[in-house]
Amino acid sequence: MRPVRFVALGDSLTEGVGDPVGNGWRGWAALLAGGLGAESVDFTNLAVSGAQTRDVLERQLPAGLALRPDVASVVIGVNDTLRRTFDIQAVAARLDKVYSALTAQGTVLLTACLPDPGSMLGLPGALARPLARRQRAVNTVVHALSERYGAVHLHASEDAWLTDRALWSADRLHPGERGHRQLALRFHGLLMEAGVATGAPPSPEPQFAPPTRSASLWWLATAGTAWVVRRCNDLLPQLLRLAADEMRHRARGSSARLDLGAAHAVAAALAALSVAEQQVRPDVV
């Protein structure tokens, strides 16, 4: 009997940032892999820190399809919201192609909605709200497409785990080892319910001691700062403009227009996918 093939696609969250093992990262996907099969599991992690939906579609997906996985996770989207080029219609179209290609092979698809980076970083409201609006848009698209393709979907954008500092790393954007274990456990539970996972769940207890406060501060002052700069260097000017626009609307009492505009953009993105599907399959009504 061949091993269960599990392929993980995504960004730094799936790469395992926040859960260091040796000279690299482990993360929730690697922790989940051992519990997918009662015997052996063939796990490949294609996730890359900083990846956006375009990277998953153009680089990771072809490699993933070639492996013909039984299970594949696609957890992506936060980095798209941190770019000045953010376009929810483009994000939706890319995710639709990725989900479609994997499920067409008979792969069990794992997806998740994610918390917005502004609130996790504790940014001031005027800066946090535009990022939250973008992440809500991405999550709405992920919800809709996960339902369309029958994905095993994890709601990770809310709940008490977001405010439990013991679950998060020093950068406040990535889970620590305990948090990665919680994600793995929650995915495993959903897969057990779906009759996909047949192995034992990962342990919720950390294998390693959490980093000391001094080590965390050192990481933030060195690698952490560089990480934030790399992710946000092209967003900051636009984010400041978005914040100024946010404050103008709040002063006029018209903030609802921003939310309404974002909702219309999401609806248009999903409607465009439906039209494209009908053009490919004219029998769809």
Image (cartoon, rainbow, N blue to C red):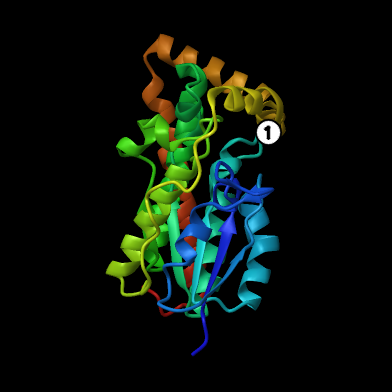
Looking at the image, residue 238 sits to the left or right of residue 108; the answer is right
Residue 237 figure quarter: top right
Tell me the quadrant of the picture where the C terminus can be found.
Answer: bottom left
- According to the picture, the residue beneath numbered tag 1 turns out to be 227
Q: Is residue 231 above or below residue 62?
A: above
Left or right placement of residue 122 versus residue 241 in this view? left
- In depth, the one of 259 and 12 nearer the eye is 12
Which is nearer the eye, 172 or 24?
Answer: 24
Q: Secondary structure at mark 1?
A: helix
Which quadrant of the figure has residue 43?
bottom right
Q: Position of residue 71 (x, y in %)?
A: 48, 71
Check disc 1 and give the amino acid type. Answer: Trp
Label 1 Cα crowd, 10 Å radius (few <14 / some 14-19 / many 20+): some
Q: Residue at x 65, y 47 (%)?
A: 49
Residues 251 and 138: in front is: 138
Q: Position of residue 236 (x, y in %)?
A: 66, 24
